[in-house]
Structures are given as structure tokens and as C-alpha cells.
Image (spheres, rainbow, N blue to C red):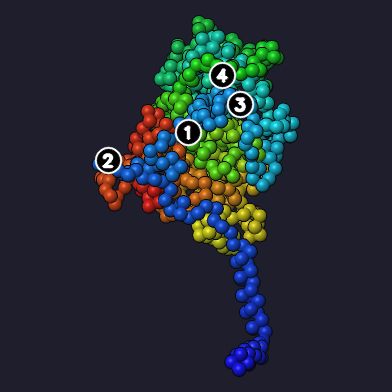
Amino acid sequence: MGFDNAMWHFDEGVTGLLGQWNTYSTLLVTLLIGVLTYHLATRTEPDTHPLLLARQAQASPVRQEGESPVYRSRSAPHGMPLNPGLDVRDPGVGKWARGRDGDLRDIWRRVVAGVPESETTPTHGGSSAATDAAPTVASENAARPRGRILTTFGTESVVETPIDEMTRQINLIGQHMLDQGGARVAIYLPNSVEFLTSLFACSFYNMTPILLPFDQQDDAVLVSMLRRSAADTVITAPGCFPFDTVVQSYPALRQLIWVVDDGSAHLDWNEVPKGMGGSVNVSTWQDVVNDAPAAAGRDLPPLENQSPPRDLTAFWEAARSEGITGVSANPAEMVRFTSGNIVSAVAAQLFAIPSAQRLGPSDLFLPADSLTHMHTLVLTLAALYSNASVVLNSVAPFAGDLSLATRGVAPTVIVATPAAVLSTHDQTERNVKNSVFASLLLGWQTRTLKESGVLPSATALASRFLDSMRPAIGAKPGKLRLLYVAERAAAGTPAVSSTVLSNLRVFTGARVIYALTAAKVAGAAAQTAYYDYRVAPGKYASFGAPLTSTEYFVRSKGQHEITENNQEGEIVIRGPSVVGSEAVLGVIGRIQDDKTLAYP
């Protein structure tokens, strides 16, 4: 009886509901179903768990008076050593034995050998970016793909230098400098194949490379750098090196190697001007390479009995105020990096990229900042070690924005200057603000980044409305997936806020990593996490957590007193990638609630 009564009430309810059904009811139900369907269809998991971003570094259990706790990456906890190197495993070494830390020679050996068979290289959902940059060249060893070394000239010409030819040049140039008594080699070149070749030649033939910031406007500054570094050999290009002035002001110079372009190769560059006394041995890069037998220099020096690598000397300059010309009034700081400093920084950068996103032969890496900056050089070495293709452009570091720096190529990874990044952002933002609909889309995609923790897909329908306003980065916009930018501590680089970084992620469809660099730190002292898309107020964006090669803390200085509740003071960096294992940056920083480092 109770069941019959319940069914009768149910029937009455359904009849009453259907009796009142009308067009508005249909619209409301359809809208409700549509909203639920859209939510379920578009719902995605965040790229990383929010709790991993809420506390990105691990504090030491105790702290010294006047100092904050020491913070480390969660991947390098206290009690364990920081990452000292590349863990290179020589042939015959046991599977479970610890590998060598390695040095620059091991990086080039990895370039020659290609991707190890035990590693799989992700393609990141697309064809090889290196193939897009230049005509396809058949791999010499299909089982172990290798990256490529490319050079761009203008907007059309892309030239590949075979890896075996670079190996030959490394051997021939290195042996030539050694035969002429070279020991301390100053490299005064723009980003080029010859720059990398000279660097590796010094490493293989036990000479000290000296990286001179290119395009010095004052000859006295250049001479001062040569004198302070005690260089006896210079590798440079005609037209940018004041030979007469240097020889007269710096008699210790013994050897000069000109890197001559094809249009000037017919001239006699070996002649020493009158009055120089013949004290300088002058030769050209092309003569050294072309005069040797074709079979000479094909094999790298053996691993056995190799000498410990020499230090690398670099100069830390303040940012040039005009961006392209002009120099700082303060003399550049000369810093000597050990091989251990460099390989530790390279290993940390390799570890900082999630395994599913690591660099490989499908990537095209463009250093749009000078290779004389250690942050850019370390990232380039990391790309080479990952067997990514590298494209070099001598004018890219001086380009006003990313569109100019990437003409003629389609890079997937870029290292750029803050000035170029800000210029690209400001131009794009002005275009977006002129369209109400584009501004709404920007706000919506920014909320997706901040609240959902998901990078907006470049193929999404809504994203296509922004395509006409996006910066034209590369010959095929949309291929870029990773952009590195660095603040140079106490060097006068322009401020980059987290809002700018967030907008760049939307504009470019790429992840942006912002780092803090310093004179005595190889690579980065700290950098943002790969999947960190958060936006915080302030003039400067957060610099993220330490890498696996560094640890940081802040120390009381002046009015900045460290207490339990106030962790704001002078930044100190320690680790194997730091010259002397510790560097005081001379700038004030703050440890934030998520244990990341930022300017106040």
C-alpha cells in the first residue's frame, strides 16, 4: 500500500512538472547541460601540484645569528652534497659506479657521440625544429642522433657547420696556438661557431680561455682587460679589434688569429704593420684550417692521461644603458671560473627541466644574449650536452626585440636579455589593449595560468583570436616553448615583473624562466620553477628557488636586521657553481613565504 502511494505521488509530481514545461524551461536545462559538458570536457589537471609551488625550497634546521636559514632545492636536501658535475660515465665503468664530474671536453665529446642509446628524446609534439631552420642533412649515425650547429646571416641564409668539421677546427686551431706558445687565449668574437670552437680548443689543449665582452667602444677598456687577464693570444675579427693600439699599449701580446669572412679572405692578413718589430705572430683562422691536410685533426685527443682543465676567465660588466652601444663607467669585474664551477652549473640546468620536457635533437636553441655572459654560456653548453641543435647569430644579442633576434629561424628555446623581452612585451601589449575582445581574452588566459596552473594551448580556439597580435618570434611563430631571462645582480638590468612574465606566457605560448645571476656564480643563483605561472605584485618577479648546485640565505646589513619574522637582507650564494664556494651579491633580497628569493 505504501509503495502504491509513493508511486502515485511521483506520478503527480512528474505530471505537474511536465504540465508547466515551456520554452524557457528548455533553454535553462539546455544551458545547464551545456555548462556541465563544457566544464567536464575542458577540465584539465594543473601542470604541477600546487603544494610543490607553495614551498619550493627547504630551510636548514638551524640558522646563524644575523642570518636566515640556508635554503636549498628540495631535490638537493640538507645533509646531501650539492650537484658537483655531469656524472660522466667512461667506457667500462660499472653501471652503479659514480661517474666523473666532467669538464668542457666531455661536453663536446657528448656532442660528437650523439644521444646515448639508453635515453629517449621527446619531440614535444612536433617535427624537429632544427629541420625547419635549414635543409635536412642525413644523420651520420641514425641510431644516435646528434644536434646541429647552425649560423644565420640576415633573414634568409642559414649555414650548417658539420660537427666533424668543428672537431677538426678545434684540433687544428688548438694545436696551432699551442705550437706558437699560447697559454692564455682571449676570445674577442660575437656569437659564432668560431667562438665555441676557440673555447673547446682551449679546453682540449690545456690553455686558459678568456672571454672578452664584444663590441667595446673604448680601446682603453679593451687593453685594460687584456692586461688584467695577462692574455698572450687573441682570436678576433678584423674591423672590431684595434690592432695598432693594442700592440703599442700591450707589448705582452704574442699571437693574433684573425677570423676573416669570405669576402676578405683574398687579402694578406698575415702582414705585421711597420714599427711593430715583428713581435706578434699574425695568422688567419682560414689559413690554419685550410693549409692542413684534409685528414688532419679528425679525432679528438684521447681521454687517457689528459691534464686537468684550466680555469676560464670572464668579465662582468654593468648593463649598457642604451642597450646596443655605450659602456659602463665602472671597470668590468674579472672572474676566474674553475671547470668544476661550470660543469656544476650545466648539470643543475639539465636537472631543472622536467624529464618529459628536457632538451633534445628536436629542439633548436638560440642564444639571443652574448655568450660572454656566463648564464647564456652555461645554458648553451647544457643545450649542446643535450644534443639539441644550436643556432648562432652574431647580431641577436644587440637586437631590440625577440622578433628581430629570431629572423630566419624557428627556435624552440631562447635565452634573451631583459631589454629585448620587455620591448617585445610592450609592443604586443599595446596592440592587445587596442582591442577590447583581445584584452578580455588576455584576462581570461591569465586567470587560466594563475588559478588553474595550466599553460594555455596555442591551438585553442580562443587563442587564435590573439594570433594577429602575437609577436612574430621566429620564421614559424608558435614553435617557441621555453624562454630564459635573467636579472644581473647590481648590473643595472631593467626590472621584469611577474605580470610581464605572465603576459609573455600568453603572448608566446611558451614557458618563461626568470633567473638571478651574479658575477661569481656560473649559470644562475636561483630561477623560477618550470611550471610556476603565479603572478604576484611588485616591481620585480620572484627569482624562484635555488638550483641543485646552489643554496642561498640572507644576512643582516644596515637597517635590514634578520629576525624570525623578517628575512630580508644581503643575498649570499653558496655551492659548487660559485667561485670560492661563496659569493656575497651586494644586493638586498627577501625570502618569501614560499621560500623563494626576490628583491624587496
Q: Are marks 3 and 1 in contact (CB under 8 Å)?
A: no
**Residue assigned mark 3:** 193
- 21 and 355: which one is in front? 355
**Nearer the N terminus, badge 1 or badge 4?**
4
Residue furthest to the top in view is 277
- Name the kind of residue labelled 4 in the image: Leu
At a point 62% along the width and 62% down the height, the residue shown is 42
- 290 and 592: which one is in front? 592
Disc 2 and disc 1: Cα gap in Å?
27 Å
**Residue assigned mark 4:** 303
**Nearer the N terminus, badge 3 or badge 1?**
3
Disc 4 and disc 2: Cα gap in Å?
44 Å
Whether 600 is drawn above or below 347: the answer is below
Query: Which label lies toward us, 3 or 1?
Result: 1
Residue 258 left/right relative to 493: right
Q: Do we see residue 256 in this rendering? A: no
Query: Which label lies toward us, 2 or 1?
Result: 2
**Residue assigned mark 1:** 345
**Nearer the N terminus, badge 3 or badge 2?**
2
What SS does tag 2 mark? loop
Whether 501 is drawn above or below 33: the answer is above
- Name the kind of residue labelled 2 in the image: Gln
Query: Which label lies toward us, 1 or 4?
Result: 4
What SS does tag 3 mark? helix
Query: Which label lies toward us, 3 or 4?
Result: 4
